[in-house]
Image: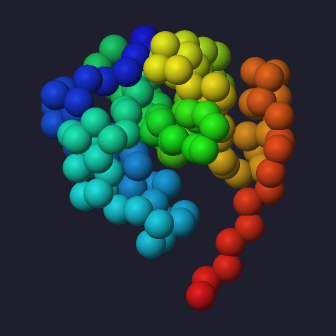
Amino acid sequence: MFSGIDKELVPIFWSEVSRMLGKVLKRDPGRDDLDNIYDSLLGGVIQLWCGFEGDTIEIVVLTKIVYCAKKKILRVLMLSGSKLYKYIENLDIIMEWGTKNECASIEFTGRKGFRKILRHLNFKETLIFYEAPL
């Protein structure tokens, strides 16, 4: 089962979710932290989506609606879990939610390996993200 998690339920799942997100944060230290993510989830600033097998969370996705000058974009902020191939088709649930919230598109940043996975879901590589410390 894959579904969005209501912000009031975040504390129930936070122990497992934070463990999974911690793995992502280690790859990109300094960009965000678990305290900020938790507060943003509780405040409704970002959204939590989880894939479950029974009582076990297998995948975690964080999204945020971003307001640009001419359109709203649904941004996938983070994705963590070992069962990506099992749940990738469930992105349509997130995309439907974005449409209901008047988002014009969905964007996703990730490692190169995601290119192959996302291509069959009509994602196009539009930018390459570069970063350097200052």
Which image quarter holds the C terminus? bottom right
The spot of residue 18 in percent (x, y) is: 31, 48
Between residue 56 and residue 67, name the one nearer to us: 67
Q: Is residue 53 left or right of residue 100?
A: left
Q: Is residue 55 above or below residue 10?
A: above
Between residue 58 and residue 118, name the one nearer to us: 118
Residue appearing at x 44%, y 72% in the figure = 30
Q: Residue furthest front?
A: 70
The quadrant where residue 32 appears: bottom left
The mark tally for this picture is 0
The spot of residue 6 in percent (x, y) is: 26, 23
Between residue 71 and residue 113, name the one nearer to us: 71
Q: Is residue 62 left or right of residue 38?
A: right
Q: Residue furthest bottom?
A: 134
Residue appearing at x 77%, y 30% in the figure = 123
**Any part of residue 82 in sight:** no
Q: Is residue 95 above or below residue 32?
A: above
Which image quarter holds the N terminus? top left
Q: How is the image coloured?
A: rainbow
The spot of residue 131 in percent (x, y) is: 68, 72
Residue appearing at x 56%, y 33% in the figure = 72
Residue appearing at x 39%, y 56% in the figure = 22
Q: Is residue 29 above or below residue 55?
A: below
Q: Is residue 100 left or right of residue 111?
A: left
Q: Is residue 116 left or right of residue 42?
A: right
**Any part of residue 6 in sight:** yes
